């Protein structure tokens, strides 16, 4: 019988040798994989050690490896390359690591650092915002972001990210140049002081109080870092005293309305107590007007202001285009109106304000030809009225990073006509104002959208109706509809209910130390109606055009506009002074 095959240590059958070979390969592969793991960890430790010792090139070489290496090695390599200012390579390393670990904000922060070094502040801010979405408690990212906004001059945005870290703490607060305003008023106008932390709310409240004083044509706050890590706050305010900040400014302000037969005598900061006297005198034969107003802080409080005023008008109206009565056309109506009143305005904080007041008005009409119907008569009745109002303003949304604000205001007015046949009346007005400066620095472009609506209940005279048209005594501008015809009022649509939307964009064209020139398009849309059917726009109105603003010495703005009625096809050139 044949002998049985024998197995020995050197091998055995061919089939057995194959099995042994495969087992050996498997064992060696597993052994190599096990050895690779500590090798990568060891390489990371060595690279980190070299980085901590300041050997950037060695650290980068040790951390450089295959594309699928751990994100920690990519981070160390990127840091080492960044220290050598090899920005492009460092950026690639950080992006590679972030692709492997998209939930790790460290890579975004380092990418922001590279963008910052390359003066790309926009990209740096985008990376930091993304990092904060992953880790909202990252103090370093908040500090970094605040610093960028601070360098761009966007103090409100900087404070938004500094404040959670109790920064910036003030070492001192001062005014430059020194103010004529009484020190007790200037101190109370500030909602912050050293050694407090300057907060965003304190900044907004201070700005609102300074604006309410009415004596500063411009303002700017500057923060200067100190060696101690704190900051010196300096408020740069252009203060009006007497006629203005200077004699030239006073003369320009006084005579700015001469082209349309008006002068504006004004005196500011009388007695260094923020007591202001403003007035207007117009000798236009079609719409004479004289007004005087005195305003002052109440009990030395810069957040509460009282205004007393008187206003007298003698105006000729031409209502042939806007009054739809059946009687004789009213082309030569004369209105004489005298009003006296008082108003309080208060700043609660940087986001809230309120106002309230009362007014007495006496009016009469002349040149009424022919009889008026019972529905027409109330609009042209001589009467004395008493009215009071209460208003509030609120900042709805502030996105300082985007330099965007959304504000709202509302006013309720109620009163009574002291003449038989008229009686009580009430009106409600509201507005939304969106303001956006698209660029991170400066005001090269500026976009503004305003939506307003209102209505009146009760019987009122024509001077109490809302008017949609461009006219100096009216603030509801449709810039393609003239408010006057041959100098006489009444050319624009009138009514007791209205809706108005205005959009405009300004582009800086030229600037020097004396004036700033801005140019841009606008679009207006609105409608006005009246329950009597005697007034109203009859249809929706659309106007478009272009306007130019010339700001002189920072206090007087001359506006020149051309608007076209997109329905009627007529154009309106207009010029006035904004105050």
Image: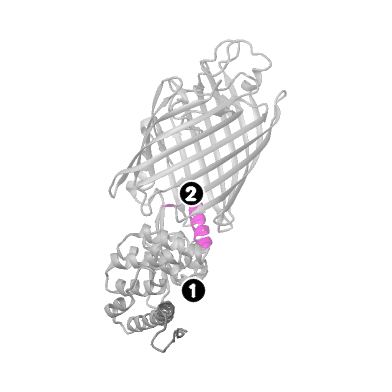
Q: Is residue 195 visible?
A: yes
Q: Which residues are magenta?
A: 199-217
State which quadrant residue 61 falls in.
bottom left
Nearer to the camera, 316 or 142: 142
For the stretch drawn in magenta, what is the main secondary structure? helix
Mark toward the viewer: 1 or 2: 1
Residue 198 drawn above or below residue 35: above
Which residue is rendered at x = 56% and y = 59% of the image? 300
Q: Tell which of 345 and 312 is nearer to you.
A: 345
User: What is the x, y in percent for residue 520?
Assistant: 36, 37
Q: What is the x, y in percent for residue 172? A: 44, 71
Using the image as rendered, state which of residue 340 and residue 576 is in the foreground: 576
User: Answer yes or no: do the residues labelled 1 and 2 have beta carbons within 8 Å?
Assistant: no
Give the residue number, with chain letter if any, for mark 1.
195
Report if residue 522 lies within the magenta region: no
First in sequence, mark 1 or 2: give its number.
1
**Residue 422 picture quarter:** top right
**Crowdedness near tag 2: few (<14), some (14–19) or many (≥20) residues, C-alpha within 10 Å:** many
> Residue 173: x percent and y percent?
44, 68
Give the farthest residue toward the bottom. Answer: 9
Q: Residue at x 53, y 38 (%)?
A: 451
Examine the structure image and report whether residue 200 is included in the region drawn in magenta.
yes
Local SS, label 1: loop
Q: In this view of the protein, can residue 475 be seen by the observer?
A: no
Q: Is residue 460 left or right of residue 26?
A: right
Quadrant housing the C terminus: top left
The residue labelled by disc 2 is: 276
Task: Judge left or right: residue 417 versus residue 274.
Answer: right
């Amino acid at each position: 019988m044949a002998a049985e095959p024998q197995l020995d240590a050197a091998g055995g059958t061919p089939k057995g040798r194959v099995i042994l070979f495969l087992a050996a390969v498997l064992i060696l592969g597993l052994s190599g994989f096990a050895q690779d793991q500590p090798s990568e960890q060891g390489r990371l430790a060595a690279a980190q050690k070299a980085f901590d010792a300041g050997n950037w090139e060695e650290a980068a070489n040790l951390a450089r490896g295959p594309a699928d290496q751990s994100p920690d090695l990519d981070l160390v390599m990127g840091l080492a390359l960044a220290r050598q200012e090899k920005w492009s390579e460092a950026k690639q390393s950080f992006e590679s690591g972030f692709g492997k670990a998209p939930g790790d904000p460290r890579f975004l922060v380092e990418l922001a650092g590279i963008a910052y070094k390359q003066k790309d502040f926009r990209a740096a801010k985008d990376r930091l915002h993304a990092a904060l979405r992953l880790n909202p408690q990252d103090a370093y990212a908040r500090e970094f972001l605040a610093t960028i906004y601070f360098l761009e001059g966007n103090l409100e945005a900087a404070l938004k990210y500094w404040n959670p870290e109790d920064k910036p703490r003030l070492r001192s607060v001062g005014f430059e140049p020194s103010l004529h305003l009484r020190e007790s008023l200037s101190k109370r106008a500030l909602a912050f002081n050293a050694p407090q932390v300057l907060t965003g709310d304190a900044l907004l409240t201070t700005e609102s109080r300074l604006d309410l004083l009415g004596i500063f044509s411009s303002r700017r706050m500057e923060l200067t870092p100190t060696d101690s890590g704190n900051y010196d706050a300096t408020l740069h305010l252009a203060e009006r005293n007497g006629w203005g900040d200077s004699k030239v400014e006073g003369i320009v302000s006084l005579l700015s309305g001469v082209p349309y037969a008006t002068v504006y005598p004004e005196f500011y900061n009388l007695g260094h107590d923020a007591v202001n006297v403003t007035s207007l005198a117009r000798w236009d034969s079609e719409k004479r007007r004289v007004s005087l107003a005195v305003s002052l802080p109440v009990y030395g409080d810069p957040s509460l202001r009282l205004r007393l005023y008187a206003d007298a008008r003698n105006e000729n109206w031409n209502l042939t285009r806007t009054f739809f009565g059946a009687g004789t056309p009213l082309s030569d109506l004369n209105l004489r109106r005298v009003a006296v009143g008082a108003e309080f305005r208060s700043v609660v904080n940087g986001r809230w304000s309120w106002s309230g007041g009362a007014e007495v008005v006496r009016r009469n009409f002349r040149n009424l030809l022919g009889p008026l119907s019972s529905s027409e008569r109330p609009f042209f009745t001589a009467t004395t009225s008493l009215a009071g109002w209460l208003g509030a303003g609120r900042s709805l949304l502030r996105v300082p990073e985007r330099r965007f604000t959304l504000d709202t205001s509302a006013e309720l007015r109620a009163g009574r006509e002291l003449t038989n046949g008229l009686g009580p009346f009430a009106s409600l007005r509201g507005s939304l104002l969106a303001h956006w400066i698209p660029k991170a620095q400066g005001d090269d472009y500026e976009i503004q959208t305003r939506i307003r609506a209102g209505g009146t209940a009760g019987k009122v005279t024509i001077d109490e109706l809302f008017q949609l048209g461009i006219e100096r005594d009216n603030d509801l501008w449709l810039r393609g509809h003239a408010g006057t015809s041959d100098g006489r009022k009444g050319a624009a649509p009138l009514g007791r209910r209205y809706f108005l939307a205005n959009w405009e964009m300004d582009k800086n064209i030229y600037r020097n130390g004396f004036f700033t020139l801005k140019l841009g398009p606008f679009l207006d849309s609105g409608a006005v109606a009246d329950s009597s059917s005697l007034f109203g726009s009859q249809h929706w109105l659309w106007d478009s055009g272009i306007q130019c603003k010339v700001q002189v010495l920072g206090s007087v703005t001359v506006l020149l506009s051309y608007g076209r009625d997109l329905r009627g096809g007529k154009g309106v050139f207009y010029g006035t002074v904004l105050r």
